[in-house]
Amino acid sequence: MEKVSEILTKLENADNTTKNELENTLVNCGSSIVPQLVDQLQVVRGIKRGVVAMTLIRIGDASIKYLEKAAHDNKDFEWVAEYLIREIKGSVAA
């Protein structure tokens, strides 16, 4: 299995089809990669950040405890984590 960072590197020059395939690859890895994704979400920008965020939302409930811990440890990340948690729980963000 490819490392999360290797998959994210491929996003740099990806078209939409490739971007979707890479996102699906990450989702298919399942909850075991959530800690890595939460770490990456705090440092990546642009298309990578969007794909990581969507992957965490699609993985779902398994992401919540890691997002909560990251929000607690990194106050600058707190709003991002709270937004994603609301999305995972199905609440409409105000």
Image: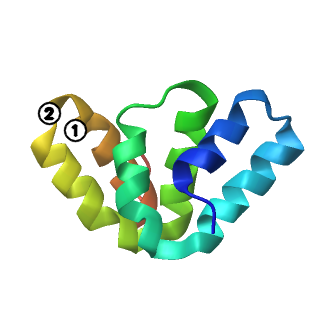
Q: Position of residue 57 (x, y in %)?
A: 50, 58
Please say if 45 is above or below 21: above
Q: Is residue 67 visible?
A: yes
Helix, strand or loop at mark 1: helix
Mark count? 2
Please say if 62 is above or below 36: below
Residue depicted at x 88% and y 46%: 17
**Mark 2 residue type:** Lys
Residue depicted at x 34% and y 56%: 85
Q: Position of residue 22 (x, y in %)?
A: 73, 53
Q: Which mark is residue 75?
A: 2
Give the position of the C terminus as an image quadrant: top left
The answer to whether residue 69 is left or right of residue 39 is left
The answer to whether residue 91 is left or right of residue 23 is left
Q: Which picture quadrant has residue 16?
A: top right
Q: Which picture quadrant has residue 43?
A: top left
Please say if 70 is above or below 60: above
Q: Is residue 94 visible?
A: no
Pointer 2 local density, CA inside 10 Å: few below 14, some 14–19, many at least 20: few
Residue depicted at x 39% and y 72%: 61
**Mark 1 residue type:** Glu
The answer to whether residue 69 is left or right of residue 54 is left
Pointer 1 local density, CA inside 10 Å: few below 14, some 14–19, many at least 20: some
Q: Which mark is residue 12?
A: none
Q: Position of residue 80 (x, y in %)?
A: 34, 38
Q: Position of residue 62 (x, y in %)?
A: 38, 73
What is the image's colouring?
A: rainbow
Q: Which residue is mark 1?
A: 78
Residue depicted at x 52% and y 36%: 49
Q: Are marks 2 and 1 in contact (CB under 8 Å)?
A: yes
Helix, strand or loop at mark 2: helix
